[in-house]
Amino acid sequence: MKIYDISQEVFSCRIYPGDPKPTENKVLSIEKGDVCNLTEFSMCAHNGTHIDAPYHFINKGKTVDKLELNRTVGYAYVVAFDGEITGCDAEYIISKARCVYKDAWHRILIKGKGIVTEEAATIFAEQGIYLIGSESQSIGPEDAPAMIHNILLSKDIVLLEGICLEKVKEGVYILSSAPLNLAGCDGSPCRAILIDMEQDL
């Protein structure tokens, strides 16, 4: 069994334009004579590697604490793609994932600079996937995310953004990307990992 950490380090992570950066404050320090080390930190729910809940773009959508955890944990399919993902591309990706193993098609992780188009988002939404992940800080065009987010989030599809897949090959893995249990929130940071179970498939 091999485990891939596909998360960004928080304090040096990528930031979506306009979002506040993570900050840390050493409240207590053993070096300064305190009994222990204690860190306080502040961050945007969408810094670094994080998930978007439907409430991020849909006012009556599910918040982070209302998401079914099986959407963020389970078999996933990693596919390498650069450029715009068309509707035909989305159908091919789902079809390929279905053929590889069980329900891996429910969670699609895009390796590279793939950009989900409106047509692709519609196909993913119609097929009923649980989660779609991207190495970008935003699914779809970074300068115009609203349409893609609305299509996917309206179907309760969790968006896993800011993942790191450069060391991961295409194929099936077990994904763990459960969010923090943040009541009423629109998103959450997560420690996303992939478990390579290839020898057992």
Image (cartoon, rainbow, N blue to C red):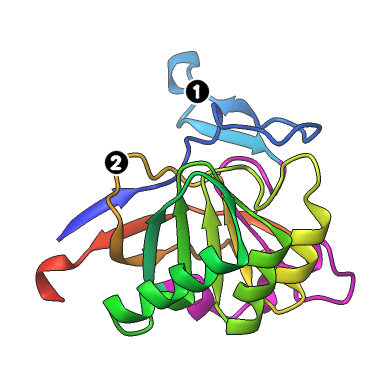
Q: Residue visible at 52% across and 73% down?
A: 91
Residue 123: horizontal and vertical position, in percent?
63, 75
Extreme residue toward the right, this view = 59
Left or right, 128 with respect to 53, comes to left
From which residue to which does the magenta span run?
Answer: 44-73
Residue 17: which quarter of the image?
Answer: top right
Q: How many labels were placed on the picture? A: 2
Residue that mark 1 sits on: 29
- As rendered, which of 96 and 125 lies closer to the eye? 96
In the displayed structure, 198 sits above or below 3; it is: below
Residue that mark 2 sits on: 167
Extreme residue toward the front, this view = 88
In the displayed structure, 147 sits above or below 131; it is: above
Judge depth for marks 1 and 2 and give the one in front.
2
In the displayed structure, 60 sits above or below 31; it is: below
Q: Residue visible at 36% across and 73% down?
A: 96
Asked if residue 63 shows in the view, the reply is no
Specify the label residue 134 is tagged with.
none
Asked if residue 42 shows in the view, the reply is yes
Residue 195: horizontal and vertical position, in percent?
27, 61
Residue 88: horizontal and vertical position, in percent?
55, 68
**Residue 47 inside the magenta-drawn segment:** yes
- As rendered, which of 126 and 92 lies closer to the eye? 92
For badge 1, the amino acid type reads Ser
- As rendered, which of 101 and 81 lies closer to the eye? 81
For badge 2, the amino acid type reads Lys
Q: Earlier in the sequence, mark 1 or mark 2?
A: 1
Residue 155: horizontal and vertical position, in percent?
71, 79
Residue 85: which quarter of the image?
Answer: bottom right
As helix, strand or loop, the secondary structure at mark 1 comes to loop
